[in-house]
Amino acid sequence: MSQDFFHEGDLVGVLTAQPLDRLLDYKAPEGGCWLGAFVEVPLGPRKVLGVVWGPGQGNFDIAKVRSVIRVLDVAPMREEMRLFLGKVADYTLTPMSAMLRLATRAPGLGDAPSMRKVYRLGDADPDRLTDARAKVLEVLRDYGGLSFTLGELAEMAGVSTSVVKGLVKQGAVSEEDTPRDTPYPALDPDYGGKILTKDQAAGAAVLRDGVRSGRYGTTLLKGVTGSGKTEVYLEAVAECLRQGRQALVLLPEIALTSEFITRVEARFGMKPAEWHSGVTLTERRRCWKMVGQGAAQMVVGARSALYLPFRNLGLIVVDEEHDTSYKQEDGVVYNARDMAVLRASLNDAQVVLASATPSLESWANVEAGKYRRLDLTSRFGAAVMPDMRAIDMRVEDVPQGRWISPTLQEGIAARIARGEQALVFLNRRGYAPVTICRACGHQIGCDHCDARMVEHRFLKRLMCHQCGETKPMPEACPSCEAEGKLAPVGPGVERISEEVAALFPDARVAVLSSDLFGSARALKEKIEEIAKGEADIIIGTQLVAKGHNFPLLTLVGVIDADLGLQGSDLRAAERTFQLMRQVAGRAGRAETPGEALLQTYQPEHPVIRAILSGDEESFWAAEAAERKAAGVPPYGRMAGIVLSSPDVQAVFDLGGEMARRDGPLRRIGAQVFGPAPAPIARIRGRHRVRLLVKAEKGAPLQAALAEWAGQFRLPNNLRLQIDIDPQSFY
Ligand code: ADP
Ligand code: ZN
């Protein structure tokens, strides 16, 4: 049995977030410490955060080993969490120090709990009861024993803070200090459930049983947009709360959180905890600490919420599980969907993967019997999947520099004449993807990347979508210096909005593209306006494909359905299929049936045909067969290796050497391809070369990769990044 408690002076091995590849030995402090304790330790002249990971190694002169400075006042890291971090590290070939950083992404964890003042009803009566004072006392009486901050109380009573302070002086309101990191209000699982349809109720019952079993299990919850997946999985959350366990719901996009939080509040009476980049630092710390104490029952968050120190996690929901934003591409490279399954299996928890268009991985796991599958086949209420048709662009008469076909134009006109909304979809931000000089043919590129600059007219600048660099639109061509010859080529949403304005001068037009909004709040307000009907035509990028409700929307027109099919990406077909189905699913959510029109130059392409026919099972079966034949994921294993450096020679030299010395990989039957310039051969001034490793499904790929990569010394400034199960090739 491993030792769980260390007495003062015992040697302990501490994991820190410093980039060292080993544990450090310290002596347990006065009072001892538990395995998993968060501690502060001296490192050189500094104090750093660490976790007691096990007994010390004792390889150093015991006289020189220093003591742990103090044990932090937070719950020790639980055994399943330590296991989880270790397994993610092994799977993704990430150093443990980086894993610990991921698991402690909240500021001031070691600080003493700071205090704040709260106000509640006092014992005395005020000497004079003005209207304003009466309002304050009324609020406090209405809410029984609850206390509020000064700002909250003044706002709820509709008075100035000085009124409250006056009451404090007289003892009618009492002022107390309480810790800032307070528990989240209790959620009531029986507060506001809806009456479910037969389908939904059956699905909810299965999920509830899973949660009640107290064992691990994963369910794919598949249903078209609007079929009530959210309603159904909230029933699983309710059951989890009844069991006294914690629930985590992951969403792919922060922009979706506030709409979702409102639904949670309507269902459970109170708001859940939130964890994502839009949350303030103090709120993050509160969330982290309360989750660890079991004083937050439900967390709604982004993928990094998986690394919160849950005390008793019973359920993880991954909403829109196919979404590519679950794959972290920077720093620790992991897929949150897969890691959610891993975490749940270590916690005896259930996973629900919800999607209208599941990933092929999840589909294959169902086929292999690893996941359960639940289908919600119809939309809630009268709504049905829209009628889907292709517009064959080869026979449409579209003038040069225009992208909306006469057929699509007619369709839009008919809808808005009836007071309905139309969505014009193009997954390209900005005005035009390419700016070319008509005199010399030069295309304006980014100075730091191997990418073209995209014109953003709204911002009046050119922007690189790789590194974010912007510059003003030049008057003259940077190459031949001809003036007034620079011309936009191809459409972005901003350009389409010009065309729409010209075709429909009387329509109210709204453009939804992530770069047009300064904040998540501004975007949310715009979305709410549109939902209320304050626009006739919406022009949007993939932002609109993700879960927003537009009840008046009945027509979706896709400008370029072929866009995602270009390029060599393994998942091009899958992505296009998912995106087109998601976008089409926006039409006709309420009572009016919808219509989706896809402009395409290749209506006979198998992917386009599958999208139109809606025959998903055949599409997946065909896609699965192709990938099986090619031995690629999810039927084979892959790893992408990207070498990057400012020095182009260095990356090719090392890449070549790695390809030659591939012994450890050959021993497991894996193959190495490359080195080749990455599809984007330069980003932020760094040249990029990639190798691709392919292995059979059961091969011990990680161990072989670690041994292989460990043979090489990396020159200064050269970075090697390994991406297991790469999602995209860039
Ligand atoms: P999905 O998550 O599959 O897109 P939602 O759960 O968001 O679907 O449901 C779509 C809409 O229909 C939501 O406004 C939801 O509140 C409503 N809805 C779904 N099921 C019911 C039900 N049984 N009773 C009342 N409203 C429902
Ligand atoms: Zn750039």
Image (spheres, rainbow, N blue to C red):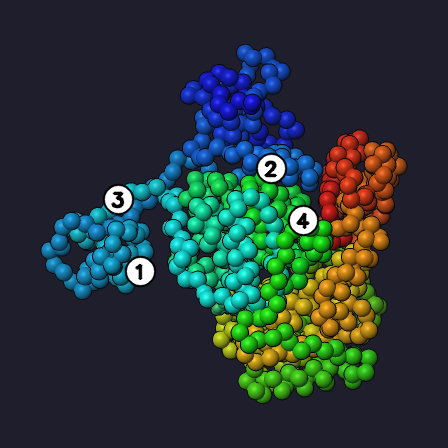
| CA gap, disc 4 and disc 1 | 52 Å
| CA gap, disc 2 and disc 1 | 44 Å
Q: Where does label 2 land, which residue? A: 85
Q: Where does label 3 land, which residue? A: 176
Q: What percent of the width, then of the height, locates residue 85?
A: 60, 37
Residue count near mark 2 (Cα–Cα under 10 Å), binned few <14, some 14–19, many ≥20: many
Nearer the observer: mark 2 or 1; the answer is: 2
State yes or no: discs 4 and 1 in contact (Cβ < 8 Å): no
Q: Quadrant of the N terminus?
A: top right
Q: Is residue 379 visible?
A: yes
| Ligand 1 within 8 angstroms of badge 2 C-beta | no
Q: Is residue 652 visible?
A: no
| CA gap, disc 2 and disc 4 | 23 Å
Quick check: 721 left or right of 84? right
| Most foreground residue, 592 or 214 | 214
Nearer the observer: mark 3 or 4; the answer is: 4
